[in-house]
Amino acid sequence: MTTVRTSPSIGIIGGGLLGLSLALRLRAVGYEVVVYERAPRGGGLAAPWSIGEFTWDKFYHVILMSDLNVRRLLDELSLTDALRWNTTRTGFFTDGRLHSMSDSMEFLRFPPLRLIDKFRLGGTIFYASKLSDWQALEGVAVTDWLRRLSGERTFEKMWLPLLRAKLGENYGNANAAFIWATISRMYAARRSGLKREMFGYVDGGYETIVGALERRLAADGVELRCDAAVTRVDTTGGKQRITLADGTRRTFDSVVVTAPATHIPELCPELGDPEKARLKAITYHGIVCASVLLKRPLANYYVTNITDAGMPFTAVIEMTALVDRERFGGNALVYLPRYLTQSDAFWEHDDATVERLFLDALAGMYPDFRREHVVAFQVARARQVMALPTLHYSTTLMPAMETSRPGLFIVNSAQIPDGTLNVNETIGLGERALPILRQHLERRR
Ligand SMILES: Cc1cc2nc3c(=O)[nH]c(=O)nc-3n(C[C@H](O)[C@H](O)[C@H](O)COP(=O)(O)OP(=O)(O)OC[C@H]3O[C@@H](n4cnc5c(N)ncnc54)[C@H](O)[C@@H]3O)c2cc1C
């Protein structure tokens, strides 16, 4: 009698770019893979949505030249020809005025800083771009590090508003590796010479990427179950069992959770108390981000950093400074993000209030802006976007991929202590997890 040998099976919780790219890799080495996504479709933070009659990313995304993991994935999905590159400009809204800060000359002319401040700022960025020992920076508060290197005035005028823009009021608890990672990513994106930024996107935005990934997974035999919220993972007969919100259950040789760390204790009640306590202690910040379709562009900077206090959003992202406006029927697509701590009262605002506050502020920033220019205004919210890299984060809080439950793994963005949150890191994280998962699954063959 012949015995039929089945491939080891793995269930992935979360159909964001991490879950989907990991599924692709695991399937390629022969496992049975099912991805569970609670939203109606995959993509997570990079999912598309409709803005007026057009479809683009719910949250703004760009691809950098140095995003080699993303570019490799695009190649595998035959999307390299759909990749478009453009130079973009950067603006600063400081002391009530817009300034261009897109090249070295503009940096030297930038009025809000004195020459000495500029040298210290440039020196800090250059120094950070040359550092490689990020672990040594984890023990230093980002505020102390930047004050020491750039001086008090540059810290107050530039770094503090930028930290607030990225981390909300959590900035005081972040370590210096965070700003090192941010600088390293941006530095890698710049071309030599004029040092202008070169940003990329795929024709059609992440809709194209997620769609191609979903089709490839289906063709390869990966099951992607959308509208499938997982409510519990537990152990049964040496396997991991997933329970969905509708009560259906399925067992796997392994389960990987890509959901935010703070959700995991409730999802996986069998984890040990110290593990649960550590996961719960991770601080996430979230975002409220408006997508605004306008009849006219604002100033055509891809990013306008805002250093003035009291603005309801923390930057202006003009997607159509990168993407051809023809894609949006000649309109301009602008994102207005505001990063928030979990306890910020801003979460309570309804869409109409966010719209009023944001449009009032836009009118204050851009004298030519008129309410009649607004074609569509939509508000997206994501409560758990990024784990805050607190002091000594990688050794005190960062979750291990292997848990105390054999076959239950955590692979999520809280495991990126030395990078910023971006799709390139996310795909790289999945690739780092692959040998650990395989080691477990190969024993099941
Ligand atoms: C405002 C903003 C701007 C960004 N800009 C860029 C950029 O310019 N370039 C770039 O490369 N990256 C950018 N990123 C980062 C990028 O979006 C992320 O790195 C990436 O999408 C993270 O993917 P993920 O799969 O780890 O997480 P997520 O996308 O959060 O996916 C996790 C998924 O798990 C699902 N889930 C959670 N719990 C359950 C459950 N119980 N059952 C089933 N499903 C569940 C969620 O619905 C979600 O889809 C940006 C992010 C934001 C928010």
Image (tube, rainbow, N blue to C red):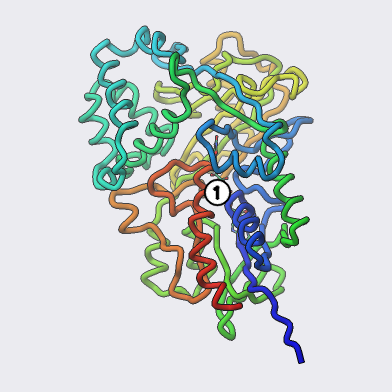
Q: Is residue 30 above or below residue 361?
A: below
Q: Please, what is the three-letter code of the amino acid marked with disc 1?
A: Ile
The picture places residue 56, in percent across and down from the top left corner, at: 69, 34
Nearest to the observer: residue 424 or residue 399: 424
In the image, taking residue 14 as reference, residue 314 lies left or right, namely: left
Q: In the displayed structure, would residue 308 be above or below residue 350?
A: above
Specify the quadrant that holds the C terminus.
Answer: bottom right
Secondary structure under tag 1 reads helix
Q: Residues within 10 Å of mark 1 (few under 14, many from 20)?
A: many
Q: Quadrant of the N terminus?
A: bottom right
* Farthest front residue in view: 1
Point out residue 114 in the picture as x, y percentages from the top left corner: 27, 11
Question: What residue do we see at 53% from left, 42% from top?
Answer: 424
Residue at figure coordinates x 55%, y 48% from the top left: 427
Number of numbered discs overlaid on the protein picture:
1
Q: Residue at x 58, y 32 (%)?
A: 62
Q: Is residue 199 above or below residue 280?
A: above
Instruction: Kindly indicate the quadrant of the structure image that contains residue 255.
Output: bottom right
Relative depth, front residue between 339 and 333: 333
Q: Which residue is mark 1?
A: 427
Please provide percent x and percent y for residue 438.
54, 67
